[in-house]
Amino acid sequence: MKRSTHLFAKFLYALLFLVIIPVGFWFWAKFTESIIRYPAIESKTAGLIITIVGVLLILWAMIALMKHGKGLPMNAFPPSQFVKKGPYQLFQHPIYWGFGILMVGVFVLTGSSSGLWLVTPLTILSMIALVWGYEKIDLKKRFPKETIKTVLHLPENSSGPTSLRDSIASVIVIAIMLTLGNYLIIKLSGNISPFTGNTLIIHPVFGNPQLQILSLIFIIIIPFLLKKKDILFEWAVSVILGLTLSVFIALISPAIGTQYFLYENSITDKGSGLALSIIAVPIFLILISLKAILRQSTKLFVYTSLIAILLGAIQLTNSSSSILHLVTSLLIFLLAANYNRIWYFLKNTSEKIANSWQEWVIGKVRIINHGFYIGIGVFFAILLAGILSGKIYAWAILVFAFIGIVFSGLWAQIVEGSEKLKRPFGYYGSLVGIPFGCLAVWAMGVNVWVIIGVASVVMPWVQAIGRFRCLVNGCCHGGPVDNPRIGIRYFHFRSRVSRISGMKGELLHPTQLYAILWLFIVGFILLALWNNRFPASFISGIYLILTGIGRFVEEAYRGEVQTKILKGLRLYQWIAIISLVIGIIMTTIPTEQIVIISGFGWETLAAAVLGGLFAFFAMGVDFPYSNKRFSRLV
């Protein structure tokens, strides 16, 4: 009986991942096709070849797991042996690589714009989240002594000398990233106005392709000039971050993202094609390379600087806006090339905030400083939401926010409430309160979808600012980590880390900071969607998907003792998966395009002030001498 149940569970698992999920992705692409206006890429030949490559890679990886791992390619029923052979020598997680390639092939074969630009990227993000939020941790637990270096593995971050393999691997990774980045920027910038019937096509026109090739050669030579692993590692990571930032900028603001292309604007019928004839090398890559050379050798830096100045002048001459190109490149350079300094600053600041608890007792009332963070966050969120949607929605936004805060308190009471936690708050409770908030604003006579859409746009900012409260309060804290370059310590006796988890002074993952960084990115994406007049249902769906993906990973590194673990995943990881599924469904709901008159009025300011004060009182003011439910925050 037990054996048959086990086999049936495996059958259901295979059915889910081999049939139900792929079919679900197909229908997701189909029902969102009219929303995504980025140009489709259709090629029967290329699509078929890419699809076959993806299928073969998946099969090769599955066979390798079954043969060398002595088990099935299933997370719920993992192989008993660590696999280093077959495609696992080339890639980490080749099944996911294969599935990503397969999706690209299928949607190029069928010419699905939504499949290529919506379903595939979000699926790849979800697979990355599964690796970072479960598989990586699970593999480390089951095989603590096993490590693997693939062919395209970047060099170690150590002081040792580089090898030829390190240089070649870095060149291949950067070349792929640069080519893909250029292509994505051109394609993503192919449509400035998603709801018009025309497409703005960007035509790269280079004055001297031969000189552009010199820039590419310059970047490719750099890894062979860098002789220390840590310098090469920092260069490679900085370049990858810089290219990722440039694609992200192109996604949220195409006009800025294409500044290092010289282009001509022409309005053509939807579906017009574009061939990218040559790879453009933006200035920030040259600057990142110069910084690496300077760490290597001052003399070599002098020579390469002269070449870099010439190449930079060529880039500025052959860009659509030399000033914008220079400013954007300098910004990307400062962020990408100084990622270590930025991280240490953010980490150390997080630790200071985590130990900054202050409280003031006035009679029977206590005011706690962490309440100011959430109060300010809600104030600015309602203010921004009111400006984006117009003053006629101000009071409805306030009511919606009020109900969300109340339900976040009720949710946490049910899930985490105890003698030590009289008045906790939980983010997912605010999502549970959405239907009740919608009912309330519908009764007020305003458009519910506008409220849902604008609330989704501002929520990441509220959550990000609210995480500062979490740092002070010690909630949402991370689990132990043995790397001082990553972890932070909590010492204040009022912190949940000390009072409840018993981890005072231990090095812990700064999970609140992880959340802030991710929510910062999500916030810009949603704001761009709103400004480009995407449907409110689509915006709210993307919000649930992206925050669900982020929360799945974040939760894996949390260390709160009161959170339950079910079937190998923490409770909130399961809820994050549900959030993602609901988000997918939300993106497919058709809604009418509503004319919104943005603006500011006294109603907006008044609603923001009232909302901020209520949030501050709810999460920053309590009654320390009472033992009643909801009375005390600590």
Image (spheres, grey):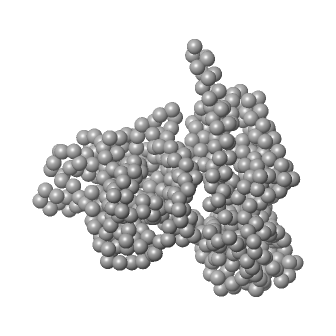
* Image location (x, y in percent) of residue 570: 47, 39
Q: Residue at x 76, y 49 (%)?
A: 106
* Image location (x, y in percent) of residue 560: 40, 44
In the picture, measured across the screen, residue 299 lies left or right of residue 382, that is right
- Residue 309 seen in the figure: no
In the picture, measured across the screen, residue 60 lies left or right of residue 471, that is right
**Above or below, 5 relative to 369:** above
* Quarter where residue 40 is shown: bottom right
**Above or below, 506 relative to 402:** above
Q: Residue at x 36, y 54 (%)?
A: 439
Q: How many marks?
A: 0
Q: Residue at x 79, y 37 (%)?
A: 60
Q: Which of 406 and 590 lies nearest the eye of the viewer?
A: 590
* Image location (x, y in percent) of residue 459: 44, 61
- Residue 393 seen in the figure: yes
Q: Residue at x 57, y 13 (%)?
A: 1
In the picture, measured across the screen, residue 150 lies left or right of residue 146, that is right
* Image location (x, y in percent) of residue 139: 61, 38
Q: Which of 206 and 489 lies nearest the eye of the viewer?
A: 206
Q: Which of 411 and 230 lies nearest the eye of the viewer?
A: 411
* Quarter where residue 18 is shown: top right
